[in-house]
């Protein structure tokens, strides 16, 4: 059976789920690149001021090699700690807070100056899900998620939102723990084994898999074989380059 509503068609992978939980940065909004650029500036400044003893560890932060495994999908504090430890640097609470605060300042300045765009394929998919009677939530470790979705004009498309502020209030552990996604599914009133998770971060797909979700969709905007393989290794059942691929052939594009 094909799920059709309002002239739109969902791909077969989504037929048997009742809800979909989407990460924000890199999935709904084109903000992952803004986060990555802010992290690079913050980490490069720290590495310059506090160079590691090992000369081979003094190279600048690499958005491709360092962002995905250490920072992407994690809270600011967890991401800062993971990267500093990877370079043999002191991940003390004071140091982590200082680097995270610098990144926050840089990200906020970029956000206020330039804003962010939403991915059209994601918007089409969310509309199709809603027309098919499926619940949709946004979940993000970022405290900026509500602002990002509001500025992009898409907040009202989602039945629920669990952002970094809510995660802190509820004391939810960060990804790769599944608690953020489980809370989003709980707010939709759907058990995880009847819901899908859509994520672009390695830690995020790992969280979806460990949370017992029926379907974990990885998103690789770079269309890179290495990234695609990494998402699959960490738990993605399927990987797409754009969420428009989750609309079946013949659906409005």
Image (spheres, rainbow, N blue to C red):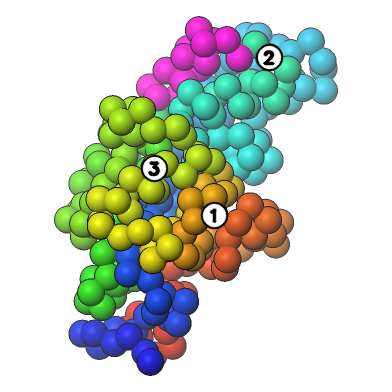
Give percent across and percent down for residue 48. Answer: 65, 14
Can you identify the residue that label 1 sits on?
Answer: 209
The answer to which quarter of the image holds residue 79 is top right
Q: Is residue 129 left or right of residue 105?
A: left
Query: Can the viewer see residue 247 in this picture?
Result: no
Q: Quadrant of residue 224?
A: bottom right
The crowding category of the residue bearing disc 2, from other C-alpha atoms within 10 Å (few below 14, some 14 to 19, many at least 20), is some
Instruction: Characterize the magenta stretch by its predominant secondary structure.
Output: helix
Q: Which residue is mark 3?
A: 180
The residue depicted at 17 percent of the width and 56 percent of the height is: 156
- Disc 2 on helix, strand or loop? loop
**Numbered range of the magenta stretch:** 91-105
Q: Position of residue 22 (x, y in %)?
A: 38, 56
Location of mark 2 (residue): 89
Q: Is residue 57 left or right of residue 228?
A: right
Q: With respect to residue 55, does 67 lie above or below? A: below
């Amino acid at each position: 059976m094909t799920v059709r509503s309002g002239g739109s068609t969902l791909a077969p992978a989504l037929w048997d789920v009742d809800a979909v939980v989407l990460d924000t940065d890199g999935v709904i909004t084109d903000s992952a690149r803004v986060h990555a650029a802010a992290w690079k500036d913050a980490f490069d400044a720290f590495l310059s001021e506090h160079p590691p003893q090992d000369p081979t560890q003094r190279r600048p932060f690499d958005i491709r090699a360092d962002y995905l495994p250490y920072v992407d999908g994690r809270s600011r504090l967890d991401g800062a700690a993971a990267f500093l430890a990877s370079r043999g640097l002191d991940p003390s609470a004071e140091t982590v807070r200082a680097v995270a605060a610098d990144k926050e300042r840089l990200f906020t300045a970029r956000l206020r100056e330039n804003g962010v765009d939403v991915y059209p394929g994601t918007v089409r998919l969310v509309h199709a899900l809603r027309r098919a009677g499926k619940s949709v939530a946004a979940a993000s470790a970022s405290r900026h998620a509500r602002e990002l979705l509001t500025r992009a004009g898409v907040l009202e498309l989602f039945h629920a939102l669990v952002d970094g502020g809510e995660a802190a209030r509820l004391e939810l552990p960060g990804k790769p723990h599944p608690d953020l996604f489980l809370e989003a599914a709980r707010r939709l009133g759907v058990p995880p084994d009847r819901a899908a998770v859509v994520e672009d971060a390695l830690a995020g797909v790992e969280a979806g898999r460990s949370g017992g979700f029926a379907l974990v969709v990885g998103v690789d905007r770079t269309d890179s074989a290495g990234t695609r393989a990494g998402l699959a290794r960490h738990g993605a059942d399927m990987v797409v380059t754009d969420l428009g691929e989750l609309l079946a052939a013949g659906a409005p594009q």
